[in-house]
Image: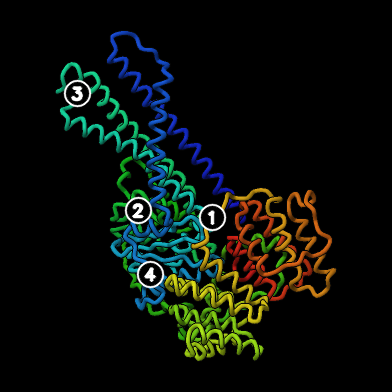
Amino acid sequence: MNFFEHQDQARHNTTKLILVFGLAVMVMILALYGVAIAVLAAESNGPVRLWRPGILLAVATGTIGLMAVGSSTKMAQLTQGGHGIAQELGGRKLSPATDDPAELRLLNVVSEMALAAGTPIPTLYLLDDEPGINAFAAGYSADDAVIGVTRGCLDQLSRDELQGVIGHEFSHILNGDMGLNLKLIGVIHGLLLIYMVGRVGLRLGYYSGGPSRRSNDNNKSQRALFAAAMAMVVIGYLGVLGGRLIKSAVSREREFLADASAVQFTRNPDGIAGALRKIGQLSAGSSLVSPMAETASHLFFGEANGSLAFLGSWFATHPPLGVRLRRLGQAPIAAGFAAEPPLAANDSPAMGFQAATAVAPVPIATETPSADRFLTALGTTDGQQLKQVRSLLDQLPAGLKTALHDPLAATAVVFALLVRTKPALQAQQIEYLSATYGPEIKQRVGQFYRQIRTLEPGQDLLLIEALVPALKQLGPEAGQQFLKTAQALSQPGGRLQLKSFTLQLILRKRLAHAMLRHPGAEIDRLEAIWDDTLTLLSLLARIGHTRQDDALYAFKLGLSQLPGAKKQASPNQLPPVTAAEITASLARLEQAAPKLKQAIVDACAHTVLADNDVTPAEISLLRAVVITLDCPAPPFIR
């Protein structure tokens, strides 16, 4: 199953979840309706009709209304996505500029994995007050994903074990589990509101004297209200238990896949297995002390809340540790436990490794991939990708490594990447920079410019992605100024270079995405974005083909991969393309449904790879386009 199929499956799972909860609500409505009829029968002196449409409508309206209020209120609280969840759990956002070795190690493990997977580097939160070993990933998409890690992970896990846990969380990001998990929180809160309203009704009835203390004239109505409140408490609580049952079943189903993905990602089954064993051997286990633990229990790496353990394994959000270990082909948990220090002697916190423990350079594959292989590689991860990323990060000059944790240095590195080699254009760019940031910027950019000239092909895009967490530390005004300056540097004299345009796409996607919400609904018809697809394929066909006939062939080959393309008007020559047009088209294509987006990416890959001779500039632009379309593109496609 590829990335797009996982996303499509996540949508189907959401639909099934809505249907299951809809069925649960129907059962609750019928139960409350039965209670209402029973109360009427008890209070009436004569026979009562069982079918009372008016009462059923009132019960249904009230129940659905309460659920809608509860769910919408909770979802409104979750507009911040994973950031809101992390803060409610007591998380502290980690800064790339931290000097704590354990925190640096965590930041670098996450950065390396994100770069290898081709996803944005998630924001990290540390749950300082949680001694258990646990972690979670939360957000509505990979662009706004956060990863939270407990203090127990930093204190108890080695780097390999921490890497296994983080690899597990990246599976949830890549497989589209996060959005479903947030919806679960909202829906269950809606069920909980029915129970809470019932409790309020009981409390009001008690403090007002209760039905037994009222006069005969009011006694019947008081008994009816008391019975209704009691029914809401009982049925609401059963509904909440049913919701938790569904939540736990959904969570358990995804955990085995996430464990297996972590092994594939790291090529080290002992890492995640070691973390699972330590959870079983540690007194705190994976439990959380936060009162939010139960609400967010299905987000975590391990069982976060054991308060429902007495109800049996059906309410467990995770499979038993022994079962997870057996699925990984590992031995059961051994007796005894010796906690490892957060940093072993050979466990450097630095991005990549220091010279004493440097990894041998991993050769980058130069074979041109097929279009099918490129599509299959999206959203997948493996240990070789991770090794290559770590190797390239290790080879970065010392000054560039420092810039990964310093926002001001990071801006200067980006400017240096955008500086042209032609003296006339370079002088124009430096003059613009000096006027914007002051004369001292020239020396800093010049220093990084010399170091950047030593980078391998493709290493510049990897560097841009690695700089994003530091760039996100810029304030709103500084961030806007940075993006404006980067855009101006990309086209000195109005001339846009392919490399600069590629870097611009990555920067705009990674830094401006949070401020640009998608307008309108999801697009699932090709005709709605046909012209935008033509614009994109025309750009890709022009890159790497010097002969017009070859470019037109590549363009037509890409179009042929689109479902229903024969029904659309297809031009017999390449449509003209400008930077503004391609930017606008990509913004609309970003709204395509997963299956349609898969066809568009497939068409792009066939266009670029039509001649089986791909330059680094072509593959870099293809990756930038794919990333702009919300698809994780690993840096090395073999």
Give amino acid for label 3: Pro
| Label located before the other in sequence (1 or 3) | 1
When the figure is inspected, residue 547 is found, relative to residue 332, above or below; the finding is below
Dot 2: element: loop
Disc 4: which residue: 94
Give amino acid for label 2: Ala
118 vs 144, nearest the viewer: 144
Disc 2: which residue: 304
Residue 175: numbered disc: 1
Q: Position of residue 143 (x, y in %)?
A: 51, 62
Disc 3: which residue: 211
Gap between marks 1 and 4, in whole Å? 25 Å
Mark 1 crowdedness (10 Å alpha carbons): few <14, some 14-19, many ≥20: many
Mark 2 crowdedness (10 Å alpha carbons): few <14, some 14-19, many ≥20: many
156 vs 248, nearest the viewer: 248
For residue 282, say whether it is visible. Answer: yes
